[in-house]
Amino acid sequence: MGAGTALWGGFHSFFSIWQVCLVQISPFYMAFIVGLFLATAGQKDNPTIGRWVGLPFLAYTVGFTVIYSILISSGLNISKSLLYNISSLRVAAGVAILIAAMYILLIDRICALRCKLSPMLLSALSLLIGLSFALIYAPCITPTMSDIMSIASKPQTAVQGWHLAVFYGIGICAAFGVTGMALILLLRRSNFVMQHTRLMKNICGVILLIPALLALTGTMRHFKAFFLGFMV
Amino acid sequence: MKFKPYKLLLAISVPGLLLALVAAGLIFSSGEKVTTQKLAPDFSLDLLDGGKFQLSAYKGTPVTINFFASWCHPCRQEIPSLVAVRSEYKPKGVHFLAIAIDDTAKDVNALIAKLGFTFPAGLDTTGKIKDDYGVYGLPTTFFIDKKGMISYSHAGSATKELLRHELDKLLL
């Protein structure tokens, strides 16, 4: 398997039946990226999508891909350490997502948050969200991912498998990014949304509170069983 | 050129994190022997039909453990293969166990009734067994030999051919 196949496998999984494997995090990512955009749209007269959404998207990709690729590369010892402590790490991820949700909810209420608003700060927040989503995610394994995990599980090919896993993760994030960007462009054209940015931003913040609370209370399995159970 | 503190922090932390993780992965993976087999962690699991499964009680016989969830699409695809292969290998002394993770008893029982599971199944309510076995994705199947060592693990939907191949190795 080559890097291109892995990249396409990740990208393709979002737009196929394997979306059911990603739906644990995809709606929350959309809420996050749209919430960030609406938070900036409410502050700036003409926010440029490239700076205000593109940079955070890249930071999210780095955060998600690094942790996700290591977690599925079980031949690496660092992967075993992370997996052994994943329950505790998921609680920490819940705290990070809670911070991001509160930021989106409170940005127009607290001057200190509004004054510090910049693409770089949002990128830092996105990096944190990317790391956190990779931790709370419990993927079901697509055929391409299964091949990558098989390569990455053997110590002698673990590094090669990890490289493929990185491309697979980037493929997933690219699909998230394309969809998020399309959603933002669509919402930007809607007069209702642009006239009610505060309300829509708050809805995004509340949606983002869901995974935070589920991760903090260790009840993510109820969400998966209830919500994903409808889809399969 | 002046950097604001958080910009500097971001500029250092992102490449630093990447480098640290890559280096750690390479360093810690290089010392491992290729042929090493890991002892399967022992556990006790309450079965959904009311019994109990203690892995150490099955030492001396091959055991296949399948981690799954009711919401997992490839897990559902795999179940007919597991059921068919189990009926072939049960008379040869192979034990099968299905462990549901990230799930609820109600949904697992509904799936079992729907798909006609015929082998023991339990719910890992705390996630302890899953963490001990290092399971990240679903489904994942572990093949444990007569000595209690993990002979092979497969991440993803297992075919009948793969299951037969690994089980034949356990019976040699």
Image (spheres, coloured by chain):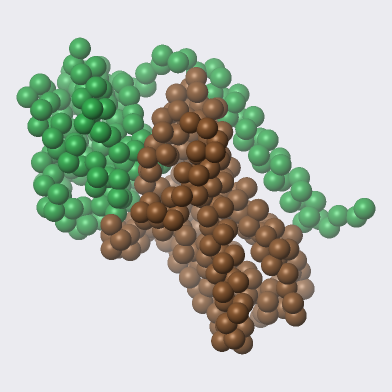
Chain colours: A brown, B green
Residue at 26% across, 27% down: B162
Residue at 20% across, 42% down: B79
Residue A80 in sight: no
Quadrant of residue A23 in the image? bottom left
Most foreground residue, A88 or A77: A77
What percent of the width, then of the height, locates residue A84? 44, 37
Most foreground residue, B29 or A20: A20
Q: Is residue B30 left or right of residue B154?
A: right
What percent of the width, then of the height, locates residue B135? 38, 38
Residue at 90% across, 55% down: B2
Residue at 54% across, 17% down: B31
Residue B8 in sight: yes
What percent of the width, then of the height, locates residue A185? 60, 72
Most foreground residue, B126 or B115: B115
Q: Is residue B35 above or below residue A58?
A: above
Q: Is residue B69 left or right of residue B25?
A: left
Quadrant of residue B7 in the image? bottom right
Residue that extends furthest to the right in the rendered view of this protein: B1
What percent of the width, then of the height, locates residue A29? 52, 61
Most foreground residue, B41 or B90: B90
